[in-house]
C-alpha cells in the first residue's frame, strides 16, 4: 500500500481503531480514480475503497469492451462502402479474433495496471465494500471479513457509479438475462439475441452482436431509437440496423419472458412470441447507493445524490457525489471532468478558500454539465451530439432556429464511399446568435463532435464561426455548409 499521511485514533462509534485521511473516495472507477488523482496532486492524503476492480464499470464492462467490440464492426462497414476495397472485405468478421482483442482491452478483467497507477499517485487502496458509518466516516469490510474504519478530515467522495436496472418481470432472474456486463464480456456469439431497449447501450450492443453473427431482434417500447437525441439520429440508426439484418420492433413491450430447455421465450405486448438464445435488458441504470450507509448521514439509501456545481451533496459540508452516482451525465468523460472539479474544490476548501461564492463560473464549478455535454454513440452510422436538441431548447424556453444539412453532400463525406448517409443539425439561439446544440449522424462523426463542443461550451458567436475555416476535403466542411444554410434561409 502506498504511503499517505495517516494518523491513528479510536473511532468512538465502532471502538475500533480508525485511520484518518484528508479525503476518502468510495469507488475506484474512472471517476474515483480522478478525484484521488486531483486530491493527491494537491497534497491531500487520500484513501480509495473498491469492492470489485480498480477501473470500474468503464474499463471492464462498459466503454472499453463495448468500443473494442464495435471498432472492427465500424471499420468493416466503412470498408464495405468503399469501391476498390469492398470486394476485399466481403466475408464476415472474425468474431473469435474480435472477442480476443476485446479480452486484451479489458486486461482480461484484471486490475494490476490500475492498482499500480494508484500506487504511483500515492493513494492508499482499501479493497472491500465501503459504507458510510456516520459523518466523515467510512467502514470497509474486506474480502476476508477484515474491517477498516477510515475517517476523512475534509471530504468523502461517493463515486460508486451505477448498475443495470432490470424491469419488474415475474421470474426474470430464472431466465438469467444479459445486462450490459454480459453483453460486453460474453465469450461466445449467441445465435439469436433479443435486445430490450432503444437507448445507447441497446443500439450499440445490437450493432455489435448483429455484425458478429447473432440474429438480433430489438424490442423498443417507445416510438424510436436514441430518443434523447434529435429524432433523425434514431431514424438513421434504425434504418442501418434493419439493413444489417436486425429486426427492429418499435412500440413493443415485453409482456413475459421465460427460459424453456435453454431457449429464451419472449411474449410481447402485441402477443408475438419470439425465441432466442440470450436476452439483453438494456433498460436503464440504477445508482449503486443502496448499501453505502446513506441512512447514517440522513440520506435516502438507493437515491441519486443531488449535488451543487462543486459536486458537494446538497446540505452537506463534507460529502461529495461525483460521476454516475449524481445522475448529471452518465458518461465517463463527463464524470472525469466532474472529478477534476470536485478534487480542486475539495483542495480549495481544505485550505480555506471560498469557491462557488467567489467565482460561480470558475474552475470549481461543473458548469458544462448544464449545457455542453457531448456524447458519441458508436453505431453505424455514428451519432454524436452536444448541448440541447431542438425539442430540449424549445422546452427550456429559448427562441431557436434549427439548421440542417445533408452530410452526404459534403465532399469529405463522399470520399467515404457511395453509400454515405448522414445528417447534421445546429440549434441556434436567435437572441444571442450562438449555438445551443449540435448533432451529427454519419460514419466518422465521432471525431467531429469536439469542434461542436468548443462552439457550444465557448458560446462562440456565429459571426466568429465563419472565421473557423474547415479543411478541404474533410467532413468538417459541414460547418461551412451549416453556416451558409443559416445565412441564406
Ligand atoms: C455498456 C456501456 C457502455 C458505455 N460506454 C461509454 C462510452 O463509450 N463512453 C462514455 O463516456 N461512457 C460510457 N458508458 C458510461 C460509463 O461506463 C460510466 O459513465 C462510467 O463508468 C461512470 O464512472 P463512475 O466512476 O462514476 O462509476 P463506475 O465506473 O460504475 O465505477 C464505480 C466503482 O465503484 C465501486 N463501488 C460501488 N459501490 C462500492 C462500495 N460500496 N464500496 C466500494 N466500491 C464500490 C464499483 O465496484 C466500481 O468499480 C457506458 C456504459 C455502459 C453500461
Image (cartoon, helix red, strand yellow):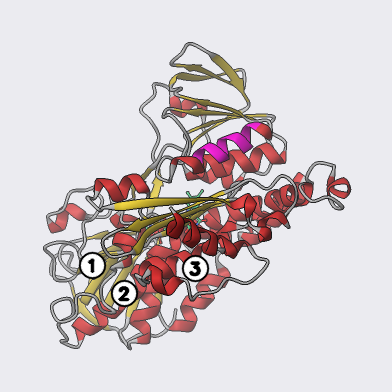
Residue range of the region highlighted in magenta in the rendering: 234-242
Q: Is residue 359 located in the magenta-colored stretch of the structure?
A: no
Q: Please tell me whether mark 2 sits on a helix, a strand or a loop.
A: helix
Q: Is residue 339 above or below residue 261?
A: below
Image location of residue 273, percent across then percent down:
55, 13
Residue 424 is tagged as none
* Residue that badge 2 annotates: 341
Q: Taking the image as four quarters, which one is ligand 1 found in?
A: bottom left
Label the magenta part by its dominant secondary structure.
helix
Specify the farthest residue to the top: 271
- In this figure, which residue is indicated by the disc labeled 3? 451
Image quadrant for the N terminus? bottom left
Residue drawn 69% across the image and 48% down it: 73
Q: Identify which residue is drawn at 36% across, 57% down.
A: 428
> Which residue is labeled 1 in the image?
309
Query: Mark 2 or 1 closer to N-term?
Result: 1
Residue 456, quarter of the rendered image: bottom left
Q: Is residue 45 visible?
A: yes
Q: Earlier in the sequence, mark 3 or mark 1?
A: 1
C-alpha span from label 3 to label 2: 22 Å
Amino acid at each position: 500500500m502506498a504511503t499517505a499521511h495517516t494518523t491513528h485514533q479510536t473511532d468512538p462509534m465502532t471502538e475500533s481503531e480508525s485511520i484518518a485521511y484528508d479525503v476518502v473516495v468510495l469507488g475506484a472507477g474512472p471517476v474515483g480514480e480522478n478525484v484521488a488523482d486531483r486530491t493527491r496532486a494537491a497534497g491531500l492524503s487520500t484513501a480509495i475503497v473498491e469492492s470489485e476492480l480498480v477501473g470500474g464499470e468503464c474499463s471492464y464492462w462498459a466503454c472499453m469492451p463495448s468500443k473494442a467490440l464495435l471498432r472492427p464492426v465500424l471499420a468493416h462497414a466503412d470498408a464495405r462502402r468503399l469501391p476498390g476495397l469492398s470486394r476485399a472485405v466481403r466475408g464476415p468478421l472474425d468474431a473469435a479474433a474480435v472477442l480476443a482483442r476485446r479480452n486484451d482491452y479489458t486486461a482480461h478483467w484484471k486490475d494490476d495496471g490500475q492498482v499500480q497507477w494508484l500506487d504511483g499517485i500515492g493513494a492508499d487502496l482499501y479493497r472491500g465494500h465501503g459504507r458510510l458509518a456516520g459523518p466523515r466516516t467510512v467502514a470497509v469490510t474486506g474480502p476476508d471479513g477484515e474491517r477498516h474504519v477510515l475517517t476523512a478530515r475534509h471530504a468523502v467522495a461517493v463515486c460508486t457509479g451505477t448498475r443495470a436496472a432490470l424491469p419488474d418481470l415475474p421470474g426474470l432472474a430464472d431466465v438469467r438475462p444479459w445486462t450490459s456486463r454480459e453483453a460486453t464480456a460474453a465469450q461466445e456469439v449467441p445465435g439469436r439475441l433479443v435486445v430490450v431497449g432503444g437507448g445507447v447501450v441497446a443500439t450499440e450492443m445490437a450493432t455489435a452482436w448483429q455484425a458478429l453473427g447473432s440474429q438480433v431482434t430489438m424490442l423498443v417500447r417507445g416510438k424510436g431509437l436514441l430518443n434523447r437525441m434529435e429524432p433523425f439520429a434514431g431514424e438513421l440508426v434504425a434504418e442501418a440496423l434493419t439493413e444489417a439484418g436486425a429486426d427492429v420492433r418499435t412500440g413493443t413491450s415485453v409482456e413475459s419472458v421465460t427460459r424453456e430447455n435453454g431457449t429464451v421465450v419472449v411474449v410481447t405486448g402485441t402477443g408475438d412470441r419470439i425465441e432466442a438464445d440470450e436476452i439483453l435488458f438494456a433498460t436503464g441504470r440504477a445508482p449503486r447507493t443502496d448499501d453505502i450507509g446513506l441512512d447514517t448521514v440522513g440520506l435516502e439509501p438507493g437515491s441519486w445524490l443531488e449535488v451543487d456545481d462543486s459536486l458537494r451533496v446538497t446540505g452537506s459540508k463534507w460529502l461529495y457525489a461525483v460521476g454516475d452516482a449524481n445522475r448529471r451525465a452518465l458518461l465517463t468523460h463527463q464524470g472525469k471532468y466532474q472529478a477534476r472539479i470536485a478534487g480542486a474544490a475539495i483542495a480549495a476548501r481544505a485550505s480555506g478558500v471560498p469557491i462557488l461564492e467567489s467565482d460561480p463560473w470558475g474552475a470549481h464549478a461543473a458548469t458544462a454539465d448544464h449545457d455542453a455535454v457531448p456524447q458519441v454513440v458508436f453505431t453505424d452510422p455514428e451519432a454524436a451530439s452536444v448541448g440541447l436538441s431542438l425539442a430540449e431548447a424549445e422546452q427550456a424556453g429559448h427562441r431557436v432556429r434549427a439548421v440542417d444539412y445533408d452530410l452526404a453532400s459534403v465532399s469529405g463525406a463522399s470520399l467515404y464511399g457511395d453509400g454515405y448517409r448522414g445528417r447534421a443539425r445546429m440549434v441556434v439561439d436567435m437572441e444571442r446568435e450562438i449555438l445551443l446544440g449540435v448533432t451529427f449522424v454519419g460514419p466518422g462523426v465521432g471525431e467531429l463532435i469536439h469542434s461542436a463542443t468548443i462552439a457550444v461550451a465557448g458560446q462562440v458567436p456565429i459571426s466568429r464561426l465563419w472565421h473557423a475555416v474547415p479543411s478541404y476535403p474533410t467532413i468538417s466542411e459541414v460547418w461551412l455548409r451549416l453556416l451558409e444554410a443559416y445565412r441564406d434561409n
